[in-house]
Amino acid sequence: MNSEQVLKLFLDSNALLEGHFILSSGRHSSSYLQCALALQFPADAARFGQAIADRFVNEGIKTVASPAIGGLVIGYAVAAALNVRFIWTERENGSMTLRRGFIVKNGERILVVEDVITTGGSTRECISALESASARVIGAASIIDRSAGSADVGVPRISLASLSVPSYDPENCPDCAQGIPAIKPGSRVKPFSKSN
Ligand SMILES: [Zn+2]
Protein backbone atom coordinates (compact mmCIF):
# COMPACT_ATOMS: atom_id res chain seq x y z
CA MET A 1 0.00 0.00 0.00
CA ASN A 2 1.77 3.19 -1.13
CA SER A 3 1.05 6.67 0.20
CA GLU A 4 -1.24 7.57 -2.74
CA GLN A 5 -3.40 4.52 -2.00
CA VAL A 6 -3.49 5.46 1.68
CA LEU A 7 -4.57 9.04 0.96
CA LYS A 8 -7.13 7.88 -1.62
CA LEU A 9 -8.76 5.65 0.99
CA PHE A 10 -8.80 8.61 3.41
CA LEU A 11 -10.46 10.85 0.80
CA ASP A 12 -12.96 8.16 -0.24
CA SER A 13 -14.08 7.65 3.38
CA ASN A 14 -14.25 11.41 4.13
CA ALA A 15 -11.49 10.89 6.71
CA LEU A 16 -9.65 13.63 4.86
CA LEU A 17 -11.81 16.64 4.02
CA GLU A 18 -10.88 19.61 1.88
CA GLY A 19 -12.61 22.94 2.42
CA HIS A 20 -12.43 25.63 5.11
CA PHE A 21 -12.45 24.28 8.63
CA ILE A 22 -12.31 25.43 12.23
CA LEU A 23 -10.03 22.99 14.04
CA SER A 24 -10.53 22.06 17.69
CA SER A 25 -7.63 24.42 18.50
CA GLY A 26 -9.67 27.31 17.03
CA ARG A 27 -7.24 27.68 14.12
CA HIS A 28 -8.48 27.50 10.53
CA SER A 29 -7.29 25.02 7.91
CA SER A 30 -8.11 24.01 4.35
CA SER A 31 -8.09 20.35 5.28
CA TYR A 32 -9.36 18.25 8.13
CA LEU A 33 -8.35 14.76 9.22
CA GLN A 34 -10.55 12.30 11.10
CA CYS A 35 -8.73 8.95 11.02
CA ALA A 36 -11.60 7.07 12.66
CA LEU A 37 -13.58 7.38 9.41
CA ALA A 38 -10.84 5.61 7.44
CA LEU A 39 -10.89 2.73 9.92
CA GLN A 40 -14.64 2.03 10.00
CA PHE A 41 -14.42 -1.04 7.81
CA PRO A 42 -12.30 -3.88 9.18
CA ALA A 43 -11.02 -4.73 5.70
CA ASP A 44 -9.59 -1.20 5.33
CA ALA A 45 -8.09 -1.26 8.83
CA ALA A 46 -6.54 -4.64 7.98
CA ARG A 47 -4.91 -3.19 4.84
CA PHE A 48 -3.34 -0.35 6.84
CA GLY A 49 -2.34 -2.81 9.54
CA GLN A 50 -0.69 -5.15 7.06
CA ALA A 51 1.17 -2.25 5.42
CA ILE A 52 2.64 -1.18 8.78
CA ALA A 53 3.35 -4.78 9.81
CA ASP A 54 5.28 -5.38 6.57
CA ARG A 55 7.82 -2.77 7.68
CA PHE A 56 8.53 -4.55 10.99
CA VAL A 57 8.22 -8.19 10.03
CA ASN A 58 11.90 -8.99 10.78
CA GLU A 59 12.16 -7.02 14.02
CA GLY A 60 11.19 -9.77 16.45
CA ILE A 61 8.18 -7.80 17.72
CA LYS A 62 6.46 -9.56 20.61
CA THR A 63 3.76 -6.98 21.29
CA VAL A 64 2.07 -4.01 19.64
CA ALA A 65 1.02 -1.21 22.00
CA SER A 66 -1.03 1.90 21.29
CA PRO A 67 -2.08 5.02 23.16
CA ALA A 68 -5.89 4.97 23.60
CA ILE A 69 -8.18 5.99 21.99
CA GLY A 70 -6.66 7.03 18.67
CA GLY A 71 -4.33 4.06 18.32
CA LEU A 72 -6.69 1.25 19.29
CA VAL A 73 -8.09 0.17 15.93
CA ILE A 74 -4.90 0.47 13.91
CA GLY A 75 -2.77 -1.02 16.70
CA TYR A 76 -5.04 -4.05 16.86
CA ALA A 77 -4.85 -4.41 13.07
CA VAL A 78 -1.04 -4.29 13.10
CA ALA A 79 -0.90 -6.86 15.91
CA ALA A 80 -3.26 -9.14 13.97
CA ALA A 81 -1.04 -8.88 10.88
CA LEU A 82 2.09 -9.68 12.92
CA ASN A 83 0.22 -12.35 14.89
CA VAL A 84 1.38 -10.90 18.22
CA ARG A 85 -0.53 -9.62 21.22
CA PHE A 86 -2.00 -6.13 21.48
CA ILE A 87 -2.11 -3.91 24.57
CA TRP A 88 -2.74 -0.23 25.16
CA THR A 89 -1.95 2.63 27.46
CA GLU A 90 -4.52 5.17 28.59
CA ARG A 91 -4.67 8.31 30.65
CA GLU A 92 -5.21 8.03 34.36
CA ASN A 93 -5.26 11.36 36.20
CA GLY A 94 -3.66 12.92 33.14
CA SER A 95 -0.71 10.56 32.74
CA MET A 96 -0.41 7.71 30.23
CA THR A 97 -0.46 4.40 32.08
CA LEU A 98 -0.65 0.63 31.53
CA ARG A 99 -3.85 -0.51 33.22
CA ARG A 100 -6.34 -3.39 33.04
CA GLY A 101 -3.78 -5.93 34.21
CA PHE A 102 -1.55 -5.58 31.13
CA ILE A 103 1.96 -6.76 32.00
CA VAL A 104 5.13 -6.41 29.91
CA LYS A 105 8.27 -8.49 30.37
CA ASN A 106 11.70 -7.08 31.02
CA GLY A 107 13.21 -6.27 27.58
CA GLU A 108 10.03 -7.25 25.68
CA ARG A 109 10.28 -5.95 22.10
CA ILE A 110 7.34 -3.64 21.49
CA LEU A 111 6.13 -1.64 18.50
CA VAL A 112 4.06 1.45 19.34
CA VAL A 113 1.33 2.29 16.80
CA GLU A 114 -0.82 5.42 16.46
CA ASP A 115 -3.35 6.50 13.83
CA VAL A 116 -1.83 9.94 13.23
CA ILE A 117 1.30 11.59 14.59
CA THR A 118 1.17 15.37 14.84
CA THR A 119 3.65 16.32 17.55
CA GLY A 120 4.37 12.76 18.69
CA GLY A 121 3.15 13.56 22.19
CA SER A 122 0.88 10.53 22.79
CA THR A 123 3.36 8.15 21.20
CA ARG A 124 6.18 9.49 23.42
CA GLU A 125 3.99 9.14 26.51
CA CYS A 126 3.02 5.59 25.54
CA ILE A 127 6.70 4.70 24.98
CA SER A 128 7.65 6.17 28.30
CA ALA A 129 4.96 4.19 30.15
CA LEU A 130 6.19 0.96 28.52
CA GLU A 131 9.85 1.71 29.21
CA SER A 132 9.03 2.49 32.84
CA ALA A 133 7.67 -1.07 32.94
CA SER A 134 11.07 -2.30 31.56
CA ALA A 135 9.87 -3.10 28.02
CA ARG A 136 12.07 -2.30 25.03
CA VAL A 137 10.27 -0.16 22.45
CA ILE A 138 12.04 -0.84 19.16
CA GLY A 139 9.99 1.42 16.88
CA ALA A 140 6.92 3.53 16.33
CA ALA A 141 4.51 3.79 13.42
CA SER A 142 1.47 5.74 12.32
CA ILE A 143 -0.80 5.69 9.30
CA ILE A 144 -0.41 9.44 8.79
CA ASP A 145 2.47 11.72 9.68
CA ARG A 146 1.22 15.28 10.01
CA SER A 147 4.58 16.55 11.30
CA ALA A 148 6.31 16.52 7.89
CA GLY A 149 8.78 14.05 9.37
CA SER A 150 9.78 16.29 12.26
CA ALA A 151 8.12 14.52 15.22
CA ASP A 152 10.87 12.89 17.30
CA VAL A 153 9.65 10.07 19.53
CA GLY A 154 13.11 8.80 20.53
CA VAL A 155 12.89 5.53 18.56
CA PRO A 156 12.90 4.82 14.79
CA ARG A 157 9.54 5.83 13.34
CA ILE A 158 7.69 5.19 10.07
CA SER A 159 4.38 6.31 8.60
CA LEU A 160 2.37 5.18 5.58
CA ALA A 161 1.71 8.70 4.30
CA SER A 162 2.76 12.24 5.09
CA LEU A 163 0.43 15.23 5.11
CA SER A 164 1.42 18.81 5.50
CA VAL A 165 -1.64 20.68 6.74
CA PRO A 166 -1.08 24.40 7.29
CA SER A 167 -3.34 26.13 9.79
CA TYR A 168 -3.94 29.82 10.42
CA ASP A 169 -5.15 32.19 13.08
CA PRO A 170 -8.60 33.29 11.88
CA GLU A 171 -7.32 36.85 11.33
CA ASN A 172 -4.61 35.58 8.94
CA CYS A 173 -6.70 32.90 7.23
CA PRO A 174 -6.67 33.21 3.41
CA ASP A 175 -10.13 31.59 3.06
CA CYS A 176 -11.62 34.03 5.62
CA ALA A 177 -10.03 36.90 3.68
CA GLN A 178 -12.03 35.71 0.65
CA GLY A 179 -15.24 35.62 2.70
CA ILE A 180 -15.61 31.84 2.56
CA PRO A 181 -17.58 30.62 5.60
CA ALA A 182 -15.64 28.30 7.91
CA ILE A 183 -17.26 25.15 9.22
CA LYS A 184 -16.67 23.07 12.30
CA PRO A 185 -16.22 19.43 11.26
CA GLY A 186 -18.85 17.24 12.87
CA SER A 187 -21.49 19.95 12.62
CA ARG A 188 -24.51 19.32 10.43
CA VAL A 189 -23.30 21.56 7.63
CA LYS A 190 -22.37 19.56 4.54
CA PRO A 191 -18.57 19.28 4.62
CA PHE A 192 -17.90 19.96 0.94
CA SER A 193 -20.26 22.91 0.60
CA LYS A 194 -18.60 26.31 0.66
CA SER A 195 -21.81 28.23 -0.03
CA ASN A 196 -24.06 27.55 2.97
ZN1 LIG B 1 -10.67 30.86 7.95
Image: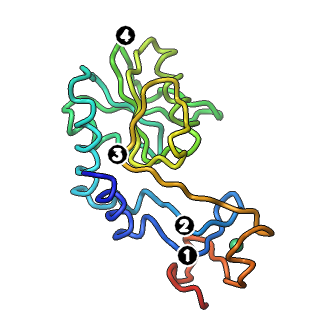
Disc 4 residue type (three-letter) = Gly
Per the image, the residue denoted by label 3 is 74
Mark 1 and mark 3 residues within 8 Å of each other at the beta carbon: no
Q: Nearer the viewer, mark 1 or mark 4?
A: 1
Q: Secondary structure at mark 4?
A: loop
Mark 1 or 4, nearer chain start = 1
Image quadrant, ligand 1? bottom right
Q: CA distance from mark 1 to mark 4?
A: 46 Å
Residue neighbourhood size for the residue with mark 3, other residues' Cα within 10 Å, grouped as few (<14), some (14–19), many (≥20): many
Q: CA distance from mark 4 to mark 3?
A: 24 Å
Q: Secondary structure at mark 2?
A: strand
Question: Is 62 left, or right, of 143 in this rendering?
Answer: left
Q: Nearer the viewer, mark 1 or mark 3?
A: 1
Mark 1 and mark 2 residues within 8 Å of each other at the beta carbon: yes
Which quarter of the figure has residue 37? bottom left
Disc 3 residue type (three-letter) = Ile
The image shows residue 158, relative to residue 20, as above or below, that is above
Percent x, y of residue 8 = 33, 65
Per the image, the residue denoted by label 1 is 19
Q: CA distance from mark 2 to mark 3?
A: 22 Å
Per the image, the residue denoted by label 2 is 31
Per the image, the residue denoted by label 4 is 107
Mark 1 or 3, nearer chain start = 1
Percent x, y of residue 160 = 35, 46
Task: Name the residue located 62 percent from the left edge and 66 percent from the top edge.
Answer: 29
Given the current orientation, which residue lies at the most extreme top position? 106
Percent x, y of residue 43 = 21, 57
- Residue 178 circle label: none
